[in-house]
Image (spheres, rainbow, N blue to C red):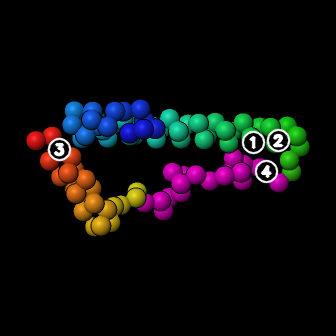
Amino acid sequence: MGEIGIDRREFLYELQLWEINAIVKGYRRRHRAIWEAARWQSFLWMKARGAKTIHDLHDLAVFPWEQSHHEPNKMTDEEVEEMREVLRRENEKRK
């Protein structure tokens, strides 16, 4: 909520799940583009300086979204229960 710039109340009570999903995907896409641009600039700078061991962007860094075996993070049962408890407490406060 903080890094994305959404007020806590709006996030918890006003947004639909599909809206939150879209916001998080957009946030991740923006950060992904920043990291890829930084890698590209580093690659060009190193090649211009005569780097002999750098032949490909992936020689500098391979990001998690580029790895084929990368699985999305899944919440554990404990994390799910903790989230339910937080939401229950927040709902009790609203009453």
**Mark 2 — residue?**
47
* Residue at figure coordinates x 53%, y 54% from the top left: 64
Q: Earlier in the sequence, mark 4 or mark 3?
A: 4
Q: Earlier in the sequence, mark 4 or mark 2?
A: 2
> For the residues marked 4 and 2, what is the alpha-carbon distance in whole angstroms?
7 Å
Q: Nearer the viewer, residue 24 or 41?
A: 24
* Picture quarter with the N terminus: top left
Identity, as a three-letter code, of the amino acid under mark 4: Ile
Crowd rating for badge 2 (residues with CA inside 10 Å; few <14, some 14–19, many 20+): some
* Residue at figure coordinates x 53%, y 41% from the top left: 32
Label 4–label 2 contact, CB within 8 A:
yes
Secondary structure mostly seen in the magenta stretch: loop
Q: Earlier in the sequence, mark 1 or mark 3?
A: 1
Label 3–label 2 contact, CB within 8 A:
no
User: What residue occupies the far right of the structure in this picture?
Assistant: 50
Identity, as a three-letter code, of the amino acid under mark 3: Lys
Crowd rating for badge 1 (residues with CA inside 10 Å; few <14, some 14–19, many 20+): many
The image's mark for residue 61 is none
Identity, as a three-letter code, of the amino acid under mark 1: Phe
**Mark 3 — residue?**
93
Residue numbers of the magenta segment: 53-71
Quarter residue 25 falls in: top left
> For the residues marked 1 and 2, what is the alpha-carbon distance in whole angstroms?
6 Å
Q: Earlier in the sequence, mark 3 or mark 2?
A: 2
Q: Secondary structure at mark 4?
A: loop
Label 1–label 2 contact, CB within 8 A:
yes
The image's mark for residue 54 is 4
The x, y position of residue 50, in whole percent, is 89, 43
**Mark 1 — residue?**
43
